[in-house]
Image (cartoon, rainbow, N blue to C red):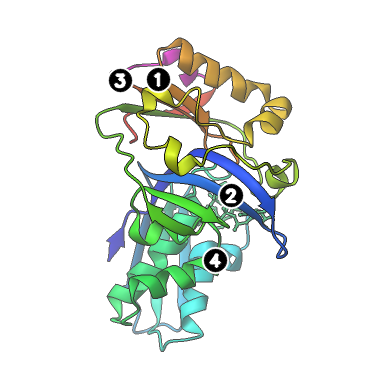
Amino acid sequence: MTVFPNAKINIGLTITGKRSDGYHNIETVLYPLKIYDVLEIIPNPDGEGLEFSISGESLAIPEEENLCVKAFRLLEERYRLPAVKMHLHKDIPSGAGLGGGSSDAAYTLRLLNDLFGLGISREGLKDYARLLGSDCAFFIDNEPVYAFGKGDDFRPVRVDLSDYFLVVVMPDLAIATARAYAGVRPRKPLFSLEAKSSNPPEEWKALVQNDFEETIFKEFPELSGIKESLYAAGALYASMSGSGAAVYGIFREKVHLPELEGDCRVFYDAG
Ligand SMILES: C[C@](O)(CO)[C@H](O)COP(=O)(O)OP(=O)(O)OC[C@H]1O[C@@H](n2ccc(N)nc2=O)[C@H](O)[C@@H]1O
Ligand SMILES: Nc1ncnc2c1ncn2[C@@H]1O[C@H](COP(=O)(O)OP(=O)(O)OP(=O)(O)O)[C@@H](O)[C@H]1O
């Protein structure tokens, strides 16, 4: 069986406090993108356990560190899983703030559950996903949500970008999430993002911000340059996604940005 783990963007991101478990409390809106990896899992009756292979963008991590493998191991410890062959084709840029690895993990849980009839509920899958990373649980339902706590408690949100043209720009730069969090001082926002996101994208520029931008843009000014280029090209709203390095722009009409394509991967109509 083959599935297509998708990426996500963060619309706004406020870091509201440091938790006793070393993580941070945040609020953000998570929104699914039409940018995909490919994940195939097939029963392997002549084999044992998990045979894993990967293609596409290389990750330079040991196999057991891959979030797909971690997801398999998590279920293997709790359920009788038949031997499988798993292949992951990476196309979502990694270290981008696009949730690629998190999505791969969530889709591995969903696929094993469906393939072998494990009977795990949606909420049960989200609880397993929470053990794999803060962004993973979002990809179980994969709907736009207002996320809070560690970023894996959700409330529905009415954000619909289907009438807009979303461009995602990915420079040749990977940013480690932990390092990005270490650089930001928490703040208490006057108004919650949950309220602000009910405004249309035309009003977000003055309302909705990503708290990582200040420190990340100081270290990587080219990212701020991309954001400004998107506004210069007519974006209604532009922002870095999550802890970066991807920067996205929301346009009313279709655009083409050849000036950005030289040094970056540009994904058009991604929303
Ligand atoms: C930046 C976001 O992508 C926004 O959606 C997420 O908050 C990060 O999600 P993620 O990549 O799945 O992050 P995890 O793999 O859970 O955590 C990586 C590291 O980021 C930091 N981290 C992550 C989430 C969070 N709420 N507070 C944190 O401080 C911690 O140092 C953690 O060790
Ligand atoms: N299947 C995978 N795909 C991508 N990265 C993976 C995967 N498994 C483990 N990783 C590791 O996780 C790190 C972060 O992966 P991921 O793509 O989720 O982060 P990201 O793009 O920064 O997204 P976000 O920070 O929004 O979760 C990578 O740098 C890589 O070392």
Give the residue drawn at x 71%, y 32%.
215
The residue most toward the front is 190
The tag on residue 132 is 4
Give the residue drawn at x 62%, y 39%.
174
Find residue 52 and report its horizontal and vertical position in percent. Answer: 47, 67
Query: Which residue, given by chain and number where applicable, does mark 2 sit on?
Result: 26
| N-term mark: 1 or 4 | 4
> Element at badge 1?
loop
Give the residue drawn at x 72%, y 26%.
218
Query: Which residue, given by chain and number where applicable, does mark 1 sit on?
Result: 236
> Element at badge 4?
loop
Say whether marks 1 and 3 touch (CB < 8 Å). Answer: yes
Q: Which residue range is magenta in the image?
A: 254-262
Find residue 1 and report its horizontal and vertical position in percent. Answer: 27, 66
Image quadrant of residue 131? bottom right
Q: Is residue 242 above or below residue 132?
A: above
Mark 1 residue type: Leu
Separation of marks 4 and 3 at Cα, in angstroms: 36 Å
Disc 2 Cβ-to-ligand 1 distance below 8 Å: yes
Query: Which residue, given by chain and number where applicable, does mark 3 sit on?
Result: 252
Separation of marks 1 and 3 at Cα, in angstroms: 7 Å
Find residue 95 and report its horizontal and vertical position in percent. Answer: 58, 44
Does residue 267 appear in the picture of this structure?
no
In front of the other: label 2 or label 3? 2
Disc 3 Cβ-to-ligand 1 distance below 8 Å: no
Disc 4 Cβ-to-ligand 1 distance below 8 Å: yes
In front of the other: label 2 or label 4? 2
